[in-house]
Image (tube, rainbow, N blue to C red):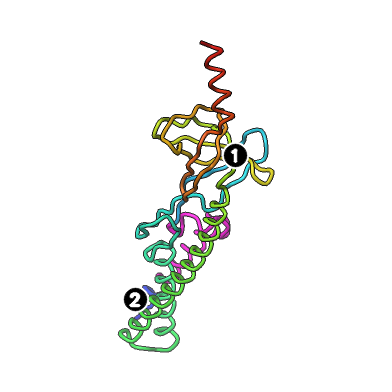
């Protein structure tokens, strides 16, 4: 019995320690739940370009294992849910043995049930938070349609480059490709035609195209 008590106590301490370390490493849960929750996003990012910078929220592709779409989701087998299971199972198992004097089978059943219930609650909470956060972020990204920007990294023919744009007094960058698959040189002015969670589709403005054409003629 004493061995089983120690096992349950060790599970509780291990789960609690992992949760505390995750909170500290993610900036006291201020890192949009960070990598400790199996959520990682890549896409738009701030860049210093002679002015203020801004991060485009939600402008990334969610990589959470089981999700098959671009919306952020929370994995049921993430480190957070696993640590929640271990913490609850260990804590309730120890209480059942040490405080309530239950038998090992009854304590084990309580531990298993408590771990599953607590992990399910954590999973439901984080899934709710992610879905609502990502939903509002995608709405904000859609509002970029029609915004003018400048090509900061050349867009190759049929490939992906990068544009910078100013919004709300802040300059940000976003991965971009040309609407007709043409190449667009660095410095060209473009307008955003559509936006996804990872990139945007742009089209060079007529004024920019004419200015670049005249420049090529002048050098010919």
Q: Is residue 189 left or right of residue 169?
A: left
Measured from the top left, where is residue 201 in percent x and y? 47, 42
Does the CB distance between marks 2 and 1 fall below 8 Å? no
Q: Secondary structure at mark 1?
A: strand
Residue at label 2?
3
Would residue 32 be counted in the magenta stretch?
yes
Residue count near mark 2 (Cα–Cα under 10 Å), binned few <14, some 14–19, many ≥20: few
Q: Residue at x 43, y 63 (%)?
A: 74
Query: Is 137 located above or below residue 6 in the figure?
Result: above
> Which residue occupies 55% across, 29% down?
188
- Percent position of residue 63, x then y: 40, 53
Q: Please give the residue where the numbered disc 1 appears in the rendered image.
A: 148
Pointer 1 local density, CA inside 10 Å: few below 14, some 14–19, many at least 20: many
**Which range of residues does the magenta coloring cover?**
9-38
Q: CA distance from mark 2 to mark 1?
A: 67 Å
Side of 179 where 145 appears, left or right:
right
The secondary structure that dominates the magenta segment is helix
Residue 8 percent location from the top left of the image: 39, 75
Q: Which of the 4 image quarters holds residue 73?
A: bottom left
Instruction: Please name whichever residue, 121 or 58, is drawn nearer the observer in this view of the structure.
Output: 58
């Amino acid at each position: 019995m004493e061995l089983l008590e120690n096992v349950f106590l060790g599970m509780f301490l291990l789960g609690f320690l992992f949760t505390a370390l995750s909170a500290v490493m993610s900036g006291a849960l201020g890192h949009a739940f960070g990598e400790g929750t199996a959520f990682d996003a890549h896409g738009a990012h701030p860049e210093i370009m002679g002015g203020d910078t801004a991060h485009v929220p939600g402008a990334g592709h969610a990589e959470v294992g089981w999700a098959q779409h671009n919306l952020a989701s929370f994995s049921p087998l993430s480190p957070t849910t696993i640590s929640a299971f271990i913490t609850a199972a260990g804590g309730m198992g120890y209480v059942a043995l040490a405080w309530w004097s239950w038998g090992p089978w009854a304590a084990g059943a309580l531990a298993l049930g408590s771990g599953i219930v607590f992990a399910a609650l954590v999973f439901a909470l984080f899934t709710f938070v992610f879905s609502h956060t990502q939903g509002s972020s995608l709405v904000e990204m859609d509002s970029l349609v029609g915004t003018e920007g400048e090509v900061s990294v050349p867009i190759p023919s049929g490939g992906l480059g990068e544009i910078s744009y100013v919004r709300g007094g802040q300059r940000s960058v976003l991965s971009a490709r040309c609407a007709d698959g043409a190449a667009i040189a660095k410095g060209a002015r473009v307008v955003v035609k559509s936006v996804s969670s990872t990139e945007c589709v742009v089209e060079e403005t007529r004024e920019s195209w004419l200015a670049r054409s005249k420049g090529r003629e002048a050098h010919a």
